Image (cartoon, rainbow, N blue to C red):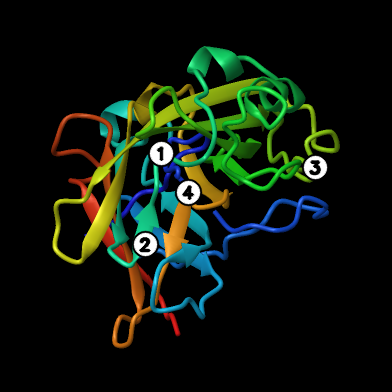
Amino acid sequence: MRTKKFILTSAAAFAVGLFAYAATAAAEPVVPNCAYVASSGNKSCGRVAVAPSNAPAGFANSQLGVRVKTLFAQPNNKAQGGFTSTVNLLFDNDFAINTAAGGGNCLSADIANKTIPQAYAACGPAGKNAYLSPPNTLSGRSSTAPPSNYGGCTMIFKGPTTNQVLIYARVTLTANSNPTCTTIAGSSAGNFTAVLTGSIAPAGVAGYGKKLVVSGISGLALPLDDFYATLKRGSYFQARCPAGASPWKMRSTFAYSGTQPNAGGPPDTVLATQPCT
């Protein structure tokens, strides 16, 4: 089966969706690339990156990175599966997402149509204090599918309720753009903002603890084909590595736009793993 890319401003992706550096980092933390899964129609992949990988046997504060990518068979053709509609990420039961932690709550209206500094002022440490990545850094990057290949910088905020996250992307609407995504003040201005909402709930699947579901992705103006983001905020995300637990795993399921059957195909599921010690 296949998997689809989390989308730009979070959605999804979340996750969305998290690898972290110090507040003085010169660039956003990068979640490594992934290899597409062989498939007809759309081809997708996912990557999970938790640090440190030498986690203790009991839960400890950690950082979570997520990357999702899709190679669309017919990008921009919504009727033929050229967009993602929903992304469902299942996280290992040796991860804990403490939704009560992480500061205040940010509303979509607080960051909609805002530049990076404006959104950070509204929901960052000096505003509603809902930012889920290290202070003054970007969470990651996103891009849209060809032929536009618009690049974007991403930020992840705690959402309107404790079980939600907001995925924000500031996009530069120039073909093949590669915006600067460093500090809040030092990043490219961009000229378009996208915001998606992800919901966190018990996974309900053996071996997994929580799930992040991002829907409404096909409502975006352009299809996102690559998204990564980093989350690190106190006890909001924790990891453990009991004896015999390795590797950690993340299961991603992607549903595509259009009415089946279509060129994008039915929902795809992909498993990503990371060794822990």
Residue marked by disc 3: 183
Please identify the quarter of the rendering in which residue 19 is found: bottom right
Q: Residue at x 32, y 87 (%)?
A: 243
The Cα–Cα distance between marks 4 and 3, rounded to whole angstroms, is 22 Å
Please identify the quarter of the rendering in which residue 118 is found: top right
User: Visible in this render: residue 57?
Assistant: yes
Residue marked by disc 1: 100
Say left or right for 123 vs 161: right
Query: Where's residue 194, x and y in %?
Result: 54, 24
Frontmost residue, 85 versus 13: 13
Q: Residue at x 39, y 47 (%)?
A: 98
User: Visible in this render: residue 38?
Assistant: no
Q: Eyeballing the image, is 41 above or below 14?
A: below
Q: Nearer the viewer, mark 1 or mark 2?
A: 1
Residue marked by disc 2: 95
The Cα–Cα distance between marks 1 and 2, rounded to whole angstroms, is 15 Å
- The amino acid sitting under disc 1 is Ala
Mark found first going from the N terminus, 1 or 3: 1
Mark found first going from the N terminus, 1 or 2: 2
Q: Which labelled disc corresponds to residue 236?
A: 4
The Cα–Cα distance between marks 2 and 4, rounded to whole angstroms, is 10 Å
- The amino acid sitting under disc 3 is Thr
Q: Secondary structure at mark 1?
A: loop
Query: Where's residue 126, x and y in %?
Result: 72, 26
The Cα–Cα distance between marks 3 and 2, rounded to whole angstroms, is 28 Å
Mark found first going from the N terminus, 2 or 4: 2
Q: Secondary structure at mark 2?
A: strand
